[in-house]
Amino acid sequence: MSAFQGTKMNPSKFHKSQLKFYAILIPLAIFMALPIVFIIFHAFKPIDELFAYPPRFFVEKPTLQNFADLFAQSNATGVPMSRYLFNSIVITLIVVFLTVLISTMAGYALSKKEFKMKKMIFEINTLALMFVPAAVAIPRYLLIENLGLINTFIVHILPLLSMPIGLFLVKQFIDQIPDELLEAARLDGASDFQIFLMIIIPLVKPALATIAILSFQLVWNSVETSTLYVNDEGLKTFSFYMSTLASQVTGNNVAGQGMAAAASLIMFIPNLVIFIFLQSQVMSTMAHSGIK
Amino acid sequence: MKTRQREYNHWIFLSPYILLFTTFIIIPVGAAIFLSFTYFNAIEAPSFIGLANYVSLITQDEVFMQKVVPNTLTFALIVGPGGYILSFVLAWLLAQIPKGPRTILALIIYSPSMTAGVAMAVVWTIIFSGDETGYLNSLLISMGALLEPIQWLQSPEYLMKIMIVVTLWGSMGVGFLAMLSGVLNINTEIYEAGYIDGIKNRFQEVIYITIPSMKPQMLFGAVMAVVGTFQAGAIGVALSGANPTPQYAGQLMVNHLEDYGFIRYEMGYAAAISVVLLLIVYAFSKVAWKLFGDKD
């Protein structure tokens, strides 16, 4: 045995040798958190504190006035807020589930199957994720128009389902599953579909959770679809609604800042909840039994 | 022979993805590449002009060669490797503390990525606001470091630096998450084998065990870093409130593209910029592939 015992990855309890890690992590985390904390405080500031000079970081007399103002704005459009919220929730659920499933299926085939076009498909996928979305806006609009998807509900869903980043990530994880494991399962009589469900999916859970988080953020925060492809107010999404409310009042006036902060906060909370919900999967350790 | 029959064709697994991917990504991208060889103002039909867009981009577009390309490279070379190394270091540090605190810290570190970048521009514009009600100005004046407020976001001198800080702040995204699960998933037996083979210190351990054991995640993180930094662009415009940014100080390739595409309606020219950008991104990501790709 050598003298150096080295890293204890994923330790189960606190030890004072870990203090040095905290010494770096905690100050950094504080720096990272400041703007978020700022927006929370800002959302609850009454108007005189928003105007205060010198500006204060903390809120002294928290108020819900900004939220009330925000929702007072909303009655103007005629479509109830619940409608936008309902659209967003349905769209988000469908997209997240299907994206994860479709990416994993494709990732399995590209990682563990042998066929001629495998390399080429993966290469095209990688190239596609490098292409700037802004450049594709006009061709994509023409395409969606020709497919007759303008002003439909599924236009929120279909274009987001194929996520090159998701496929790339999940393939990277499936690559780490040893072929022997799949071979053994096959000898035991497992069908391809069983292998996919019982071996691949459980073993790449961290990747699935990561894709789910990513896809959630993409759909939930997406304003583009509602702006470009949908004219019917009743088919638009919550994020679009929030962004229009915020942009009606922002600009350089300070009063709008409070409302904009409130809107950002409302949009931010679901992201946070989903992340908290899925993070244990991201950070879970794969069972190493049977894997070498 | 029996086992052969149980294997479904790989196309069954691939087809949903391929179908959607081709329709919504390949065809529009192909169309954009085609448009780069045309003159297209988004109203009349595109007319084919060969390489003219590329030629004028390289030989006549002074803003592009003198401002946009140097800006993009400076920005990408600092934010890309910077954000990438920071992601790895943080993931590695987080893996070495117990689960409870790790969860909380990881949540905080990841949280900027949840705010969808541009939405947070609201916060940054308030913090860097140009008059003395801006938080940074107010703080520096009260400390005596400044006498007069600085127009942070309108000054060519500071805009780029602020863009870099803001982008780094938000760069612990998917790449970070993937690396975190990568570090946590390294088989502990590999470490034990390493100590027996004579690993002497932490540094050796990281270089010889940790990084090689999580190559797929390292590659993913690297590609994401390259793609993310070159595609960044919204931030400069969101901060300064104008495209083009003041004196082109924060003008990145994506802003230049949007300037031509959506302000001047020269879609063909904008498409040519996007193709050049694609080539640059591709070249840089090849470097990542050389480092972490599986050659075996």
Image (spheres, coloured by chain):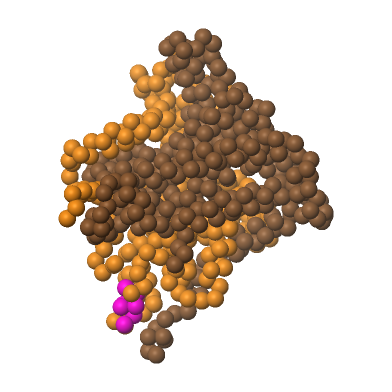
Q: Quadrant of the C terminus of chain B?
A: bottom left
Q: Which residue ends up furthest to the bottom in the rendered image? A: B1
Residue drawn at the location 48% of the way across and 29% of the way down: B123
Look at the image and tell me whether residue B114 can be seen.
no
- Give left or right: position of B62 versus B222: right
Residue A197 on image: x %, y %: 35, 70
Above or below B277: residue A112: below
Q: Nearer the viewer, residue A181 or A219?
A: A181
Q: Which quadrant holds residue A39?
A: top left
- Residue range in magenta is A181-187
- Give left or right: position of A170 versus A24: right
Q: Nearer the viewer, residue A117 or A150?
A: A117
**Colour displayed for chain A in the image of the structure:** orange
- Give left or right: position of B261 versus A106: right
Residue B180 on image: x %, y %: 35, 49
Residue A26 on image: x %, y %: 31, 33
Q: Main secondary structure of the magenta part?
A: helix
Residue B284 on image: x %, y %: 56, 50
Q: Nearer the viewer, residue A69 or A256?
A: A256
Question: Which of the chains is brown?
Answer: B
Residue drawn at the location 37% of the way across and 64% of the way down: A176
Above or below A248: residue B208: below
Look at the image and tell me whether residue B222 can be seen.
yes
Q: Is residue A184 magenta?
A: yes
Q: How many marks?
A: 0
Q: Quadrant of the N terminus of chain B?
A: bottom left
Q: Is residue A236 magenta?
A: no
Residue drawn at the location 62% of the way across and 49% of the way down: B280
Residue drawn at the location 56% of the way across and 73% of the way down: A117
